[in-house]
Amino acid sequence: MFVRLSAAVAALSLLGSAALAQGAKSTDPQIAHIAYTAGVIDVAAAKQAVSKASNKEVKAFAQDMVRDHEAVNKQALDLVKKLKVTPEDNDTSKALSKQAADKLAELGKLKGAEYDKAYVANEVAYHKTVNAALETQLIPSSQNAELKGLLQTGLKIFQGHQQHAEHVAATLK
Amino acid sequence: MRPGRHLLIATALTLAPVAVPAHAATIQVVMENLVVLPAEASAKVGDTVEWINKDVFVHTATARNGDFDVTMPAKKTVTSVLKKAGAVEYYCRFHPNMKAVLNVAP
């Protein structure tokens, strides 16, 4: 069954990309790819933060992000293997990756406290955006019950990260 | 029933309080799929809590008032003994949306 994902596309386009196709349809293999990509993006941002952050709490937060998102993505890979589903690249994933690469480059130019603040602020915004897409589109659109379950766990963990990031952001002010 | 069996049961019951001295209880708190169960639990000072983490993520049980802070590695169970009484709100430091209450009686 094909499901329109325009609202998720709209939510994800808050990330700043204009490349997202209007009225794109997403299938389970595409949804799996989008969710996996979202995790990979956060791991890359976190790895940059582990080496660049100067604040102890920011560094610890980044380490938590690497650990959790790698754990979620390992579960995702195990699940697609079990379901014999091949995650399928798509415009939403591509737009997410492009946007993330730009953000990584932008953050890479910052230093010290300025970097710490920008990284954490982006983490709050990023998790908020992904959560909105999961909640309103990716979860309702997913057809396979196990994929839906994993996305639901993913949503709870991302919501936890958003709150954690907000807490860290508050300590930096 | 044969009379001999009654005698055995009577003996066992008499011995029971001696063989099993009164001891503190053990309560279980389970963390699974980012949810803490039960959301509200009751225990007494001296009781042991078995913190059972069924997730692939590291969780903590961090008391807001500082009474305890337990870290549970992924898929591991950690035990701790309750030392102070009170209605303690706790949460996971890594996933602050995981929250629960432990009512510890003196």
Image (cartoon, rainbow, N blue to C red):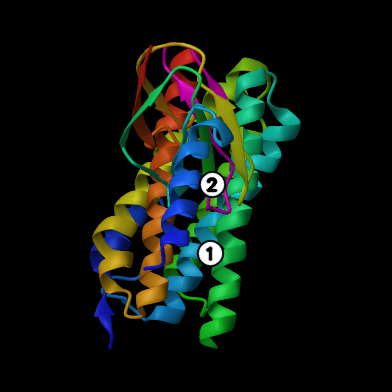
Residue at x-position 61% and y-position 52%: B75
Residue that carries the numbered disc 1 in the rendered image: A36
Residue B66 position within the rendered picture, expressed as x and y whole percent measured from the top left = 49, 12
Residue A22 position within the rendered picture, expressed as x and y whole percent measured from the top left = 28, 70
Residue B83 position within the rendered picture, expressed as x and y whole percent measured from the top left = 51, 14
Q: Amino acid at mark 2?
A: Asn
Quarter placement of the N terminus of chain A: bottom left
Q: Amino acid at mark 1?
A: Tyr
Residue A149 position within the rendered picture, expressed as x and y whole percent measured from the top left = 38, 66
Task: Please tell me whether mark 2 sits on a helix, a strand or a loop.
Answer: strand
Range shown magenta: B53-69
Residue at x-position 47% and y-position 60%: B4
Task: Please tell me whether mark 1 sits on a helix, a strand or a loop.
Answer: helix
Residue that carries the numbered disc 2 in the rendered image: B53
Residue at x-position 55% and y-position 43%: A103
Chain where mark 2 sits: B
Magenta stretch holds residue B66: yes
Question: Mark 1, residues whose alpha carbon is within 10 Å: few (<14), some, or many (≥20)?
Answer: many
Decide which of A159, A7 is in the foreground and name it: A159
Chain where mark 1 sits: A
Magenta stretch holds residue A127: no
Which of the labelled discs sits on residue A105, or is there none? Answer: none
